[in-house]
Image (cartoon, coloured by chain):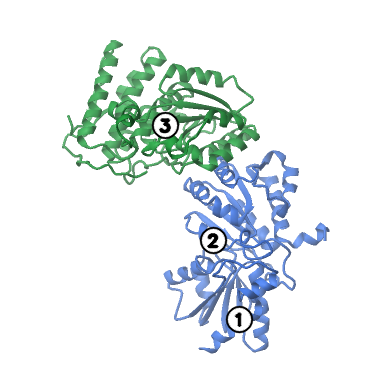
Amino acid sequence: MSSEILFVSYREINKIINLKINDYVKAELLALVNRLNTISIIKKAGSGHIGTSLSAIDIFIWVKFFQFKTYKKDIKKKFRNIFFSSKGHDVPALYSVLYSLGIINFNKILKLRKIGGLDGHPDISVPGIDANTGSLGMGLSKAKGILWAKKYLGKKGKVVVVTGDGEFQEGQIFEALQTISHQRLNEIIVIIDHNKIQSSQFVKKIIDLKNLKKKIETFGWYVRRCDGHNFKKLNKVFNKFSKIKNKPKLLIADTIKGKGISFMEHTKIMRKQKNYTWHAGAPNNKDFGLAQEELIKKIKLKFSEKLLPFPKFININKKNETKSNNNLIEIH
Amino acid sequence: MNNSKKKNNWITNSFTDCLIKQAEKKKEIILLDADLSDDVNLFKFAKKFPKRFIQNGIAEQDMVSMAGGLALMGLLPVVNSFASFLTARANEQIYNNSTENTKIIYMCLYAGILPAGAGKSHQSLRDISLLSSIPNMKIYHPYNFLETRKILKYCINIERNNCAIRLSIGPPPTGSLSLPKNYNFKPNKGSVMTKGSDGIIFSYGQTMINQAYKAYQILLKQKIKLKLINMPCINSFDKKWLKKTIGKIKHLFFLEDHNINGGFSDLIISFMMNNKILNNQVLQKFGPSEFPACGTPEEVLKYHKLDHISLASQIKKKLKNK
């Protein structure tokens, strides 16, 4: 199993999308197959940010598929819903989601971090990517500009931006919190992927964010906090947000770095280790094999629970192409 | 002093008046300001187009990224602050916007060494080096009010790249040379301000062109004739035009009030080398290499040996050592 790199194809994912089932269950199925595709994208590339991709992916799934839908036909239109990640290094998960939406094709996701393929951090030359990010701290300001322009031009569509929690150490974020509130750009929605770990350490150990909710509320924002892996709770917060008109809105989504793969979840690792070891870099063959096995088991269990046929998997590594990657390539 | 008519020939006023005229025609022009509108009378714009003026407070990074968002939606943001703050503090934000291949116009106020009373925190001597490594960034420095209008119109209507327009603040120096009759701004080219064949001075901006012209006058009395060229395009050049303009003239001088490392001089000399324009010419750069001094204009130019008297003597010395 260890030399296989398995994907669930767009066709198979489309079958899930078209199932007549409850949205929360559908989101769970989509999240599982997208987790598999995400780690495979990173494994194929040989590098990429796995922990943050897995903490943010449920938010991506909920927003893109259910809350503020993205359609392929609209990706260049000014009235479309704008959604991007300011931290940017979670882009393997976003690519996976964009692939599931039929916006980028399979050949592209096999070429993460390769010339002519997909950039290691978001770039608008890739369909479905709404802003260039990756250098931390700029996303709120950019989203603010997009929202201002939408209002000026009379164009509809939501503006939602995801940030990291460590990213709240950047000064520009606080410039933006202040100006967005003053300029009454209240329609903006910010989601903090609060996975508690930056690079390899706890945020609270590097620079503690203290009472983040209170801090942001002081800037004139409406702030909610919920489990960022629970679709029901996410939905509830978004419903609440839709009723708040007089303040910009921010969700602190409590997440787990590495969520979905037991031995990558920070909640487990940080009990035993001083450092979180799955921030950047592709897993070696053994770890990848274990991660893949665990996800496939979960997929099969979930599908059989719901009496659904298993999705088919494509193995792109028939010729044993993967180089052994025992050392993580640490690029933050 | 408060007579605004008297200020019609100020670069900053000319810029604002022209921007208002352009904004009347182009609804996509949006002005962003980091609370430095007074120096360039942007309140006139704000009064005329209150819905198209974004006061962003003293938050340059946020302002520049916001401009990036506006540009992504097809608007044309014009971003105002002092060059030293805008291009240095928000440099990464400018770079990030540039990678999206949108178009933004950056107003780089208070470019250069004068006025020198505020000192090194405000004088901008690094912005060219900070911006010129961004591939789709065109940097301009208009010489006077007339050229300011022409360059702004060009940047708004024709230029496809991002534009950084360096603007000198304060009145034009007394005894300023006019631009040639029927002057037309041509991208990548300069304009010949004085005729001569003993050497060429390439320079830009009201401060240094004025010193160069006064140095020219001193040397003219000593029968040395210099060709003075105004180069408003700081980082893009026309090979053919340069070749023709230089001809067989042996001595080339490059004069600026940006830091001598990484400024216009370095850019044009590299261009000349890469395009085989040079033919055994002798080159000399003049410009500050230290932190800029604080003082009156005369004191500071003299301190950095950029006043006309120092320049004339340095040029003469160089020409004698043929």
- The numbered mark 1 sits on a residue in which chain? B
Looking at the rendering, which quadrant does residue A15 occupy?
A: top left
Q: Which chain carries label 3?
A: A
> In this rendering, which labeled residue sits more in front, label 2 or label 1?
2
| Image quarter hosting the C terminus of chain A | top left
Identify the image quadrant of residue A144: top right
- Label 1: state its secondary structure: strand
- Residue B7 image point, x, y percent: 78, 60
Residue A330: horizontal and vertical position, in percent? 32, 44
Q: How far apart are marks 3 and 1 (CA)?
A: 66 Å
- Label 1: which residue? B226
Point out residue B183 in the picture as x, y percentages from the top left corner.
66, 67
Residue at mark 2 to residue at mark 1: CA–CA distance: 26 Å
How many residues crowd mark 1 within 10 Å: few (<14), some (14–19), many (20+)? many
Hey, what amino acid is under mark 1? Leu
Q: Name the residue under label 3.
A: A196
- Residue sitting at 60 percent across and 22 percent down? A244
Tell me what residue is drawn at x 67 percent, y 65 percent: B116
Q: The blue chain is which one?
A: B
In the rendered picture, chain A carries what hue? green
